[in-house]
Image: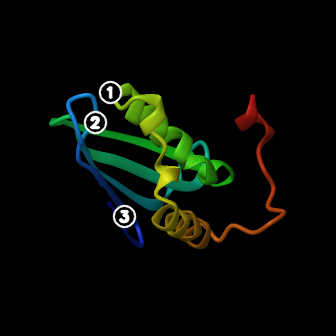
Amino acid sequence: MATFEPGHLHIERHALNEKDVSYNLHIDYEVTQDPKEGKGMQFTMHGSIQGKDMTESFFLPKDQAYNFASNVTKIAEKYGIPKELSSIGSVHKPYDKMFEDVRVQLNMQSGDPVNPEHFE
């Protein structure tokens, strides 16, 4: 199950058997200004994975904010969700709404400049 509202995505999954994984995750995000990187998006992922509480935050500069799912996937794997279950992209409709909301909040346009140092 997944629900979206601007600035917040909630993803919940209940294990179907003992080999499956349960999680209840919230991803909150807001536009912020980093002194070094400039305008970007601050993300906070919190909730529980397999009944264990977790909280982790990360900042992405404007030209990398589209890549938030990669960071979320890495965090999910770090806290015990297997790779085959860790992609939030599997919840397409809410994920697409979050992606669009990030774009709107940061006023991202096709052709916006990118910092090549972010890709090294």
Question: Are discs 3 and 2 less than 8 Å apart at CB?
Answer: no
The residues bearing labels 3 and 2 have C-alpha atoms spaced at a distance of 22 Å
Q: Residue 14 vs residue 11: left or right?
A: left
Q: Residues within 10 Å of mark 1 (few under 14, many from 20)?
A: some
Q: Nearer the viewer, residue 3 or 111?
A: 3
Q: Are marks 1 and 2 in contact (CB under 8 Å)?
A: yes
Q: Earlier in the sequence, mark 3 or mark 1?
A: 3
Mark 1–mark 2 Cα distance, whole angstroms, equals 9 Å
Compared with 74, 66 (above or below) is below
Provide the secondary structure element on which disc 1 rests: loop
User: In the image, residue 1 lies at what x, y percent?
Assistant: 32, 60
Q: Which residue is mark 3?
A: 8
* Residue located at (61% from left, 67% from top): 103
**Residue at the image position 65 percent from the left and 71 percent from the top:** 107
Disc number lying in front (1 or 2): 2
33 shown above or below 37: below
The location of residue 60, given as percent across then percent down, is 56, 46
Of marks 1 and 2, which one's residue comes earlier in the chain? 2
Residue farthest toward the right in the current orientation of the protein = 111
Say which residue label 1 marks: 80
Callout 2: SS: loop
| Residue plotted at (24% across, 42% down) | 16
At label 3, counting other C-alpha atoms closer than 10 Å, the crowd grade (few under 14, some 14-19, many 20 or more) is some
Q: Amino acid at mark 2?
A: Val
How many residues crowd mark 2 within 10 Å: few (<14), some (14–19), many (20+)?
A: some
- The amino acid type of the residue labelled 3 equals His
Give the distance between the C-alpha atoms of the residues marked 3 and 1, in whole angstroms. 22 Å
Could you tell me which quadrant the C terminus lies in? top right
